[in-house]
C-alpha cells in the first residue's frame, strides 16, 4: 500500500494484513507520515537488508505488528528483532530451492513467506512452481506469494488442504497502473476465497 485514499478503500474490505514497503529502491516505497487503520487489520512493514535501528524506528513510528524480511537476514538478526514485533521471513523459491534452509529460522520467526526467485526483491508478478511445496516438511505456517491472481483461487483452496498456509500475499496482479490496488478485484478475490 502506498497512498492514503487507496489504503482507506482497501481497509473497507477488511483484509487480515496490509503491507507497507520501506525499501527505498521500490517503486512502492511508503513514505507517508502515519498509517491509520482500524484495529482489526495488522500492519506489516516490508524491509530488504535494512539495519536493526531503522527497522526498530519504523516499528515504533508506525506501530507495526509484523516485519517482513525480504533480504538476506540471518537467524541471529531475526532473533534480535522478535521480541519487538512478529516476524515473517521471506524465502525466494525456484525449482531447486532447498527447503531445509527454512529449518534454522523456525524458532525465531512467526511465519515464512514463499515468493518467486527473480532479480527483483518481490513484486515481479511471476509465479513459482507450486509443486515444489511438496518438499516443504516444516510445520511452520507460511504465506504463499508470487504472481497470485484471481484465477488461482481453486488451486489455492486445494493447496490450503495440503500445507500449513497462513494466508496469501497479493500485489502486482491486483494493482492499477498508478500503483494503487484495485478495490473491485480484491473484493472479488476475498469473496471467492472465503466461500
Image: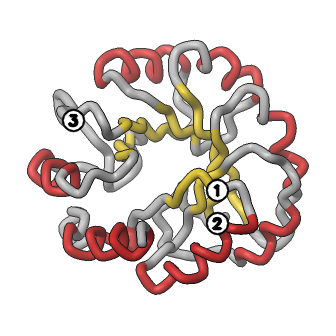
Q: Along the polypeptide, which appears first: circle 3 or circle 1? A: 3
Disc 3 to disc 2, how far (Cα)?
27 Å
Left or right: residue 159 compared with residue 37 = right
Question: Which quarter of the rendering shows the C terminus?
Answer: bottom left
Residue position for label 3 = 38
Looking at the rendered structure, the number of numbered marks drawn on it comes to 3
Above or below residue 119? Residue 5 is above
51 or 87: which is nearer to us? 87
Among numbered discs 3 and 2, the one appearing first in the sequence: 3
Coordinates of residue 156 in the picture (x, y in percent) = 58, 74
Instruction: Give x and y (percent) for residue 89.
Output: 64, 41
Within the image, what quadrant is residue 170 found in?
Answer: bottom left
Q: Position of residue 98 (x, y in %)?
A: 88, 57
| Vertical placement of residue 78 versus 89, above or below | above
Residue on which the image places disc 1:
165
The answer to which of marks 1 and 2 sits earlier in the sequence is 2
The kind of secondary structure element at disc 3 is: loop
- Do the CB atoms of the residues marked 1 and 2 lie less than 8 Å apart? yes
Amino acid at each position: 500500500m502506498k497512498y492514503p485514499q487507496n489504503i482507506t478503500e482497501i481497509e473497507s474490505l477488511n483484509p487480515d494484513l496490509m503491507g507497507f514497503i520501506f525499501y527505498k529502491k521500490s517503486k512502492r516505497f511508503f513514505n507517508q507520515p502515519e498509517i491509520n487503520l482500524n484495529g482489526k487489520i495488522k500492519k506489516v512493514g516490508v524491509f530488504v537488508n535494512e539495519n536493526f535501528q531503522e527497522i526498530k524506528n519504523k516499528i515504533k513510528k508506525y506501530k507495526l505488528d509484523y516485519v517482513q524480511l525480504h533480504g538476506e537476514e540471518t537467524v541471529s538478526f531475526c532473533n534480535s528483532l522478535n521480541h519487538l514485533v512478529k516476524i515473517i521471513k521471506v524465502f525466494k523459491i525456484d525449482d531447486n530451492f532447498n527447503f531445509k534452509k527454512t529449518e534454522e529460522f523456525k524458532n525465531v520467526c512467526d511465519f515464512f513467506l514463499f515468493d518467486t526467485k527473480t532479480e527483483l526483491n518481490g513484486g515481479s508478478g511471476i509465479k513459482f512452481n507450486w509443486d515444489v511445496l511438496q518438499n516443504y516438511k516444516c510445520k511452520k505456517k507460511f504465506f504463499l506469494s508470487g504472481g497470485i491472481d484471481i484465477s488461482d483461487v481453486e488451486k489455492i483452496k486445494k493447496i490450503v488442504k495440503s500445507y500449513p498456509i497462513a494466508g496469501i500475499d497479493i500485489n502486482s496482479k491486483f494493482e492499477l497502473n498508478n500503483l494503487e490496488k484495485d478495490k473491485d478485484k480484491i473484493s472479488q478475490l476475498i469473496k471467492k476465497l472465503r466461500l
